[in-house]
Image: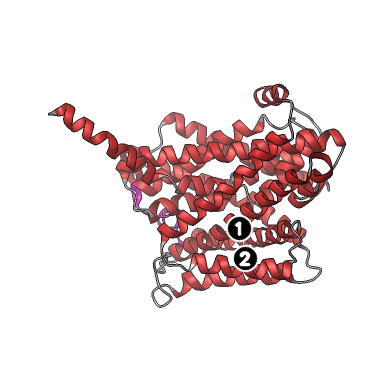
Amino acid sequence: MTKKTEKKRAPLDRRRVLAAMGPGMVAALAGADAGGVATYSNAGAEFGFGQLWTVPVMCVLLIVAQETAARMGCVTGKGFASLIREQFGVRLSALAMLALLISNTTVTLSEFAGIASGMALFNVPSYVSVPIAAIAIWMLTMSGSYRRIEKILLAISCVFVTYVIAGIMVKPDWGDALNATFIPRISTSPTYVSLLVANVGTTIAPWMIFLAQSNVVEKNAHEEDIPYQRIDTVTGAIVASIISWFIILTTGAVLYPAGVHVDSAEAAASALAPLAGEYAQVLFGAGLVGASVLAACVLPGITSSAICEAFGWERGADRSWSEAPAYRGIITVIIAFSAIVVLTPNVNLFGIMMLAQVINGVLLPVLLIFMVLIASDKHVMGKDANGRAWNALTWFTIVMVIVLTVIMFVLQAMGV
């Protein structure tokens, strides 16, 4: 009887693994947005394979942050914003939400800029690509079904395979690349350090913590789902890390030997054409557009959801305008504002993105401290509270992020 029962349960476990897939994958891949592609491309163009060793390190840090957020969502059934309000009060919660709103809106701007730049590589003008993208993204977020939204976002994520194909096409020195992945190649160059800081910022962004936990709550995951959500989280982090590894690999193999310097993702894509062929540029450009669209679909919704949750307002993709006017209104304003600003002539998009980087640099360590304090509280998490080893790893992540953030500010003050 027992054997028969076990045999019957096995398929159910496999289905639960598949059912759990989504939140961690979307959260991790959304981090490989226009800013992320630009950062990884710049790292490869400036230092070749010199920063490939950072990819597995960042993967571990991403797993720590995302797994903790997903576990908190499974145990409490609440989003991160709600837990911050309950544990630390309304004032700190309101301050965190204001910073998140400013930061996420500026990052959404960069995503629409990425869409415009990426489509320009295919000779599509921004006054055509940006409005169409804005309308499509708005319609998706207003579709009224979280399951449908998640499936579409996962489908968009498939475009990231273009970076893998581009990496294979340029025929890199695989032995040298693997050596650089497992044996750190450290440089004291200010540019090297600055890019290292940027890698942390683009791998673990404040909004990704809210997204990972919110998505788990939206899926109605419970305590018994933690092992399955953990599989999703780890898988998402590994896939996202593979993508970033191939972006550095491609630009490191092609642009670095040629001495080509890039300051944006679209510049990297354009530079690949004469050196690696038109198909490499097309693949890189398609990846940029897909990455920007994915993040632009995610950011307005998670921002609105966090703010509404912090103040106790109705929220969720399944809520109508009459049920959740603030939730849908905030999403609409962020999308419309971002599209309009990107289409405004002579707007300083770089300055706006720098503002987002500064806010993220301040906000991320604070949110990570909130997260570890909540995850360590047995009154909140019960038997699923952080253990000593996980606590130590989380605090190491926090200290590392704070140190690198301080370095980032010092470098910016020096004008590096």
Instruction: Report if residue 366 is visible in the image.
Output: no
User: Which mark is first along the chain, 1 or 2?
Assistant: 2
Looking at the image, do the residues carrying marks 2 and 1 touch, with CB atoms under 8 Å apart? yes
Does the segment drawn in magenta span residue 396?
no
Give percent across and percent down for residue 127: 72, 70
Numbered circles on residues, count: 2
Q: Is residue 105 left or right of residue 258?
A: left
Look at label 2 and name its amino acid. Ala
Give percent across and percent down for residue 81: 46, 57
Instruction: Tell me the quarter of the image containing the N terminus.
Output: top left
Quadrant hosting residue 120: bottom right
Look at label 1 and name its amino acid. Val
Q: Residues within 10 Å of mark 1 (few under 14, many from 20)?
A: many
Residue under circle 1? 293
Instruction: Report if residue 216 is visible in the image.
Output: yes
Q: Which residue is drawn at the image coordinates 73% and 64% (left, top)?
A: 124
Q: In terms of secondary structure, where does tag 2 sit?
A: helix
Give percent across and percent down for residue 191: 80, 39
Q: In terms of secondary structure, where does tag 1 sit?
A: helix
Tell me if residue 101 comes above or below residue 201 in the rendering. Answer: below
Tell me if residue 121 comes above or below residue 241 in the rendering. Answer: below
Residue under circle 2? 133
Q: Is residue 376 left or right of residue 165?
A: left
The magenta region covers: 75-90
User: In the current view of this chain or complex, which residue is farthest to the bottom?
Assistant: 322
Residue at mark 2 to residue at mark 1: CA–CA distance:
8 Å
Q: Residues within 10 Å of mark 2 (few under 14, many from 20)?
A: some
Q: Which residue is drawn at the image coordinates 46% and 54% (left, top)?
A: 151
Q: Which residue is drawn at the image coordinates 66% and 32% (left, top)?
A: 54
Q: Which residue is drawn at the image coordinates 62% and 72% (left, top)?
A: 336
